[in-house]
Amino acid sequence: MRSIAVINQKGGVGKTTTAVNLAASLADSGQRVCLIDLDPQAHASLHLGVTVPESVDSVYGVLTGRRALADIRQMVAEKFWLVPSHLDLAAAELELATEVGRETILSDCIAQDPEPFDILIVDCPPSLGILTLNALTAVGEVLLPLQPHFLALHGLSKLLQTVQVVSERLNPDLRLTGVVLCMFDAGTRLANEVANDVCAFFEQHRESSGPWCETDIFATRIRRNIRLAEAPSFGQSIFQYAPHSHGAEDYRRLAGELTARAGSSGQRVSSAA
Ligand code: ADP
Ligand code: MG
């Protein structure tokens, strides 16, 4: 099973929109997809029209050992399942702080999960705390959405350092599959300049041995598209809400590119790579 964490410690860069619509597109193409909402804000769950009542367990129940993934997983479309989140997950950050092996809880739960999926996608919160560490420990790949504004590269080193530390200490198979530029305004000079800066940043480190030395930006840019912003209020993916929009077109293309990268080698995150 392929597994991908969508991470960026910044909020509002397109993580949830990417996680939900990429998952939906992969499911549309016939793959069995499980999306885990690991953000206490539960935006991915809301985007897919799922609200977990106070009395019912969410992914929080899984991380605290009360439930298995299969107990709370819901089917949201054909071949598409969601492990929903709830605001109470915010407590996990503190509660797990003193727990031994706290970074591997999600990874252990996934290992015990009997359901065969083709692909698992984890939507992460806007931080590099214990929840994101659990995601990085549990998956094989990282997908990094960036919004092309002038602070796009700010904080990137910290993020990549975190990925490298996890790969060294907890998950040697982890690799950074790619960067996806979201909310891209092709007509603006700023967007194109930042895109070039991001390319240059990764190009510059291609020679080095850092964790991002073989990372590429996806050729697909996710254009700014109002339909993508509207879809969550209808509890629908872009393919249900506006299947012929630019947003649907871009995420379909991104899913194709991601699938094509499945077998590519040499993208391991390792200082020794
Ligand atoms: P994150 O999960 O990183 O916080 P979101 O995916 O929730 O970011 O996106 C932040 C906001 O921007 C949301 O309101 C979302 O609907 C909107 N948005 C995301 N991508 C696009 C896009 N390509 N075009 C227009 N709006 C977008
Ligand atoms: Mg989000």
Image: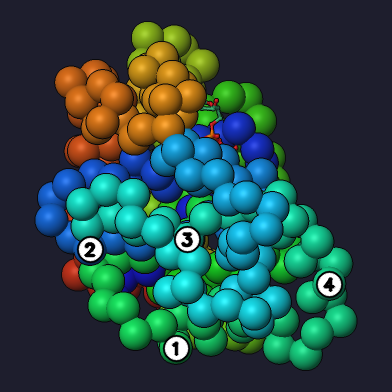
Does label 4 point to a residue whose CB lies under 8 Å from ligand 2?
no
Name the foreground residue: 67 vs 230.
67
Residue 79: percent from left, percent from top: 22, 57
Residue 92: percent from left, percent from top: 76, 66
Q: Earlier in the sequence, mark 2 or mark 1?
A: 2
- Number of residues whose C-alpha sits closer than 10 Å to that of mark 2, classed few (under 14), some (14–19) or many (20 or more): many
Left or right: 177 in relation to 64: left
**Secondary structure at numbered mark 1:** loop
**Secondary structure at numbered mark 2:** loop
Q: Which residue is mark 2?
A: 32
Q: Which residue is mark 4?
A: 95
Kindly identify the residue that appears in the image at 58 percent across and 24 percent down. Answer: 149
Task: Return the mark for residue 112.
Answer: 1
Kindly identify the residue that appears in the image at 29 percent across and 60 percent down. Answer: 33
Q: Does residue 227 appear in the picture of this structure? A: yes
Left or right: 187 in relation to 219: right
Q: Earlier in the sequence, mark 3 or mark 1?
A: 3
For residue 262, above or below residue 173: above
Left or right: 252 in relation to 84: left
Q: Amino acid at mark 2?
A: Arg
